[in-house]
Image (cartoon, rainbow, N blue to C red):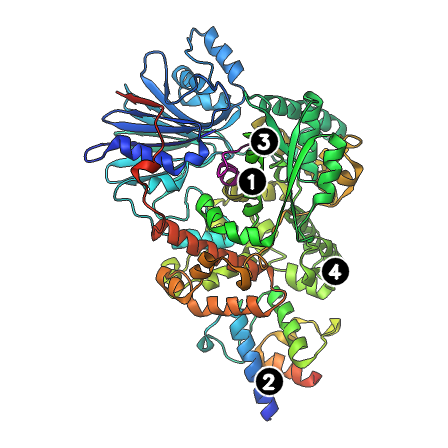
Amino acid sequence: MKELESIKISIRSYILDASLTDKDKIDDATLIFDVGLLDSMGLLFLIEHLNETYKIEVNDEELNPENFESINSIVSFVQNKI
Amino acid sequence: MCGIVGFFGSTDGLEPEMLLSKMLTRIKHRGPDESGIYLSDKIGLGSARLSIIDIETGTMPISNHDNSLWIVFNGEIFNHFELRDELIGKGHVFKTSSDTEVLVHMYEEYGSSFLNKLNGQFAIAIYDKIKEELFLARDRVGIRPLYYTEIGDSFVFASEIKSLIEFPELKLSLSAKSIAQYFTFWTSISPNTCFEEVFEIPPGNFMIINSKGKRLSAYWELPIYKPNEYNYLNVEDAAEEFENIFSDAIRLRLRADVPVAAYLSGGLDSSITTSFIKNMNPENLQTFSIGFDDKDFDESVFQNIASDYFNTQHSTISCNSREIGDDFKDVVWHSEAPLLRTAPSPMKLLAKNVKDNNIKVVITGEGADELLGGYNIFKETKIRHFWAKDPGSKIRPLLLKKLYPYLPQINNSNSNVLKMFFGYKLKETDSPIYSHLLRWNNTSRINKYLSDSYKERIKEYDPIRAFEMEIEGKLEGLDSLTKAQWIEIKLFMSGYLLSSQGDRMAMANSIEGRYPFLDHRLIEFCMKLPPDLKLNGLNEKYLLKKMMKGRIPSEILGRSKQAYRAPIQSAFNHKNLPDYLKEMLTDKEIKKSGIFNLNHVTQLLNKMKSKKQVSEIDNMALTGILSTQILYDLFVNRSISELREEDLIVLDKVIID
C-alpha cells in the first residue's frame, strides 16, 4: 500500500511538472489528455520517464490511451508492470 | 537598399532635424553610405541609403519636377528602366538615373495604382505638398518592412521599430495577445507587432494619411484558384513557362551598379538560382554558405558539391553553438520580435561574411518551398487527409514516419505512437486551417509559461480560433495544398521567414537579399498550377526537379528535403551562456518583466540542465522566453544607451521647405 502511495505521489508530481499545472486543478481521475494537460509528445516523454524511473518497457499493444488517461490509470499500469 | 523614417503632423515642441537624425542613426546599418532629410512645418522624411543603383546622384529625398512630391524609399524596383522609358514617353523629365526618381513620377502619373506596375521589393513614403497627404506602401509579400504608430497628433513611421522609440514621449509596451500569437504561429497576425499600438503596413497594402485620418487599402492579394481554374496540366509545358518567367526574374535581379553574389545552401532552391545566374553571367560569380560544427545541422558536403559543380568563387564559414549564444542579444535587437528558434543567428553570421567580402547584394532562394510544396507541413497535410479517410488504418499513419528525422521520438515510433502524435483533430478536414492545426496546437503550449497577469490580459483569447474566424469562408472550395500554401505564405513567410530570418539579419550587416522566386509573376504562375505539379505524391517541388534534371548535381536533385535549423539546447547551455543572457533568466529579471511564471521558467531551466535531450517544445519555449525577456529589456525597459550627439549620422542632404 505504501508503495502504491509513493508511486502515485511520484507520478502526480511528474504530471504537474510536465504540464505546468497547479495541483488544485487536477485530481487523480482527471483525464489528462482530454483536458489537454499533456499532448501526444507529452505521452512519449511520460513513457520515457516511466522507463527511467521504474525500468518499465511499454510495448506496442500497451500503448493505448486507456492505460495513460489519468493518474489513477497510470499508477495501476505501473503497478501491474513492476 | 535603405532605411526610411518620418513623421507627419505638428512639429511644435520638436527639434525635427535632430529627431530625424536620431531616428536614422538607429537604423544606419540599413543604409550606411549616405543620408538625407526633407523637412517642412507639416512633415519630416528621412533616408539612410545603401547605394546600389545610381551611386552618384541617387541621394534621397528626391522630388518630382516641381518639387510638389517628395519621396524616401527602401528597396529596389527591378523594372525601373522599363518604367522610366514609359514615363519619358509620356513627357516626364528626369534629373537623375535612380529608381527612386522613377517612383515619384510614377505616383504623379498613375496615383496609387502605380504599385501594380512595380516589380520589386520596397517600402515607400511619398509626401504630396499640395494635398498635404502622406502615402506609404509596401511590396506584395513583405520583403521590406514598414512600421507606424501614432502619438498625440503625430503619425510616425520607420523601417524598423527601433527608430520609433526616438520619438519623444513614445513608450513601448509588449502586447500580451501578440505574444500569444508569436507563441503559436511564430509571428503575429498582421498588422499587429509584438508591441501595443505599433503596427506594420501589411504586405501588398498602401496607406494614405491626411487631415481626415488614415486609410489602408490592399493593392495585391495572393491569388488563389479553384481546381477548375488551374493552368498547365502537364509538367513539360509548365516547366517551359516557369523557366521563361524565372529567367526574367533572375535577369532583373542582376541589375545593380555593384557586384551581385548568391547564397548557396546546398539545397535545391539556391542551386537553381545559381544555375540560372551562371547561365546568364558565367564569369566570377561569388557564392556564400554557412556550415555548422554540429553535424546534425551541417550541409557543407552539399554546399561543396554545388560550388564545385557551378565553379563559383565560394566562401564558407562555420558556425558553432557558442556563437549563436554570444550573438543572440543582437539578433533579437535586429529582429524586434519574439523568436522560437535560433535559425536567424546563422543567417546574420552569413550576411556578415558577405559584407566582409565587400559584397552588398545577394540572390537567395526563399519562396520556392512555399510556392512549390517544399515544406514537410504540406506532406503532413496530405498524409493526414489520406489517413482521415480511413482513421482505423494501421498502415496510413506510417507514411508520417519519415517526415521529421530530427525528432527521434517520432522517427523510432510505431503506428500507435504516430497515431497519438499526428491524430490531433484528424477528422476536421473541413477546417480552413486543417494543415496547421496540429503544429499550432503543439507550439501554443508555450503560452503555459506566461505569468498569471499576462494570462489575465489574454483571458479567453485563442489565437488559433481568432485566425480561423478571420479567414472564414476565404479558402472555401480550394484544394488542401492551396489552403496550406496560402496560410504558410501569409503568416510564416511574410511574418517570420522574410523578416526575422531575412531582411533583418541581412540588413543588420547592410546586405540586400533579392528573391527571384518571389517575383510576383512567378507567384501568380505557381498559384495557378495543379497541386500535383508541386507535391507529386510525396515528392516535393516536382516541377523544379523535372525542370532541373541534368542541370544541377544529381546528389542535390536526389536528396530529401532538409529543414534549415540551428542548435538551441547547446547554444543556451547554462555553462557557457553569456552573462547578459544569464541575467535575463534570473529570478529578478523574470519578476521585473512580469511576462513569465517564475516557477515554470525555473522548472524548464532545471530540465534543460539535467536532461541530455529535451523536446522541441522545450527548446522553443526557452528560445521564446529568452528572446521576449531581451525584447522587454531593450525596447520596454530601454537598457540601450541614449544616442549622443557624436553618435549621430552626418546628413549629406538637408531640404528645408
Q: Quadrant of the C terminus of chain B?
A: top left
Left/right of residue B635 with respect to residue B186 in the rendered view: left
Q: Which mark is residue B362?
A: 3
Give residue B307's quadrant in the image: top right
For label 3, the SS is: strand
Chain ID of residue with mark 4: B
Residue marked by disc 1: B489
Say above or below: A29 vs B592. below
The residue carrying pointer 2 sits among few (fewer than 14), some (14 to 19) or many (20 or more) residues within 10 Å by Cα, namely: some
Question: What is the chain letter for disc 3?
Answer: B
Identify the secondary structure beneath mark 2: helix
Distance, label 1 to label 4, CA atoms, is: 32 Å
Q: Do residues under tags 1 and 4 come within 8 Å of each other at their CB atoms? A: no
Q: Is residue B386 above or below residue B166?
A: below
Tag 4 near tag 2, CB within 8 Å: no
* Label 2 sits on residue: A7
Amino acid type, mark 3: Val
Q: Secondary structure at mark 4?
A: loop
